[in-house]
Structure formats: structure tokens, C-alpha cells
Image (cartoon, rainbow, N blue to C red):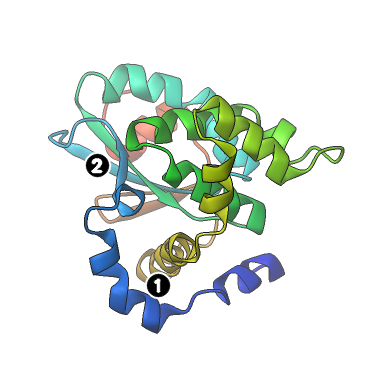
Amino acid sequence: MPIERRSLLALVATTPFLARRASAAEGDPRFSPRTLGADQAPIKVSEFFSLTCTHCAAFSRETMPEVKAKLIEPGKLQMIYHDFPLDRVALMAAMVARSLPVERYEPFVAALFASQDRWAFNRDANPREELAKMAGLAGMPRAAFDAAIADKDLQQFILAGQQKAEDEFQIDSTPTFVHDGHTHPGEMSYAAFAAFIGVSAS
């Protein structure tokens, strides 16, 4: 496990947090599931991703448009998103994404992946300030952005979920996809994704 990942997971105060997690989640949209596609879709796929992962960004840019058009929009597939931040910048970005209205989550995540070089890897810019600009474009005022990235309950929720993913599915890299008890680490072409979930690629 990379040093950065160990330092992130050291932030998880699991016992006291999990004791209040259920009550905190009730009525708070920040803690609700993030999905794309109909709840009634017969195929469910969980994606564990980090917003600073270049492979996750490649899947978002190159494969997801076809997944949306051929599987999600026709009602065949529901994607279930799981934050799995690999570093502190990704954690901060995940906290901001979850603090937006639920319907803005997936478009914001897609926008972050599309502009990853600008906000995550730009050595001439401050990732926090670049994220604030992106959040502003998504309708989040600066005060709300500052509150989001300072929210310890939200941070603990994301990291506790990440720890659960490691324990339950042995997730250790991103992106990782889980479907019907099977796990696939790494980005995929549309054909490979279709094969993974057992549908025709045509």
C-alpha cells in the first residue's frame, strides 16, 4: 500500500464514527448512494475510483459515453459509484463532489476527470484553488466549498467506506469494478466492459 494511502487510512477513527454513521446518514444527501441509471436496471456495477487516478479518467472519457448510450440510458445498467481516494487531493475532490446536490454529482465527477491535468497535476497551480473554481462553475459558493473540505464527518464517511471496500472486496487499486461477485481491476474498453457484465458489445 503506498505511503499516501496509509496516511489517509490513518485518519479513519472507525469505532466512534461508525457508531454515529447511521444517524448522520439519515436525511443528509451527502451520505446517500451515488448512482447513474435506473434503480430498476437488472445489471448493477460498482465502480471504485479516485479522482486523481489517470486510469479512472481514461475510463470516464473513453468508455463511459458508450456505456451511457448503450446500457444506462436504455435502462439495462445502473452504475454505483464508490469513492476510493488514493491521496489527499482526491479525498478533497470527493468531499466537494458529495457536497453538491445529488443530481450534480456525476456531471461534476465527469468534469473533474475531463480536466484532471488542470486541477490535479498542474504544478503551477494550487489544487485547492483549482477545485474551488470547478466547484464554483457547478454552483457551489466559496463559503460552501471551504465548509465541505473542512467537514470531518464527511471525510470520515468517505474513508470508512474505503476501508470497508478493502476489507470486503480487497480493493487496492483504481478503477476497480465489481459485478455479481466478480471483480475487475483496471480501466476497460467498452467491449471488455460488456464482456465483464455478460452483455453483447454490439
Could you say where residue 77 lies in the image, as x and y percent from the top left?
25, 32
Q: Earlier in the sequence, mark 1 or mark 2?
A: 2
Could you say where residue 100 lies in the image, as x and y percent from the top left?
43, 39
* Residue in the picture at 78% in, 43% down: 126
Q: Quadrant of residue 131?
A: top right
Q: Amino acid at mark 1?
A: Asp
In the depicted structure, whether residue 202 falls above or below residue 15: above
Q: Is residue 79 visible?
A: yes
Is the C-beta separation of discs 1 and 2 under 8 Å? no
The residue carrying mark 2 is 44
Which quarter of the rendered picture does the C terminus lie within? top left
Q: Nearer the viewer, residue 10 or 78?
A: 10
In the depicted structure, whether residue 82 falls above or below residue 20: above
Tell me: 76 left or right of 137: left
The residue carrying mark 1 is 167
- Residue extending farthest to the left is 40
Counting the numbered discs, the total is 2
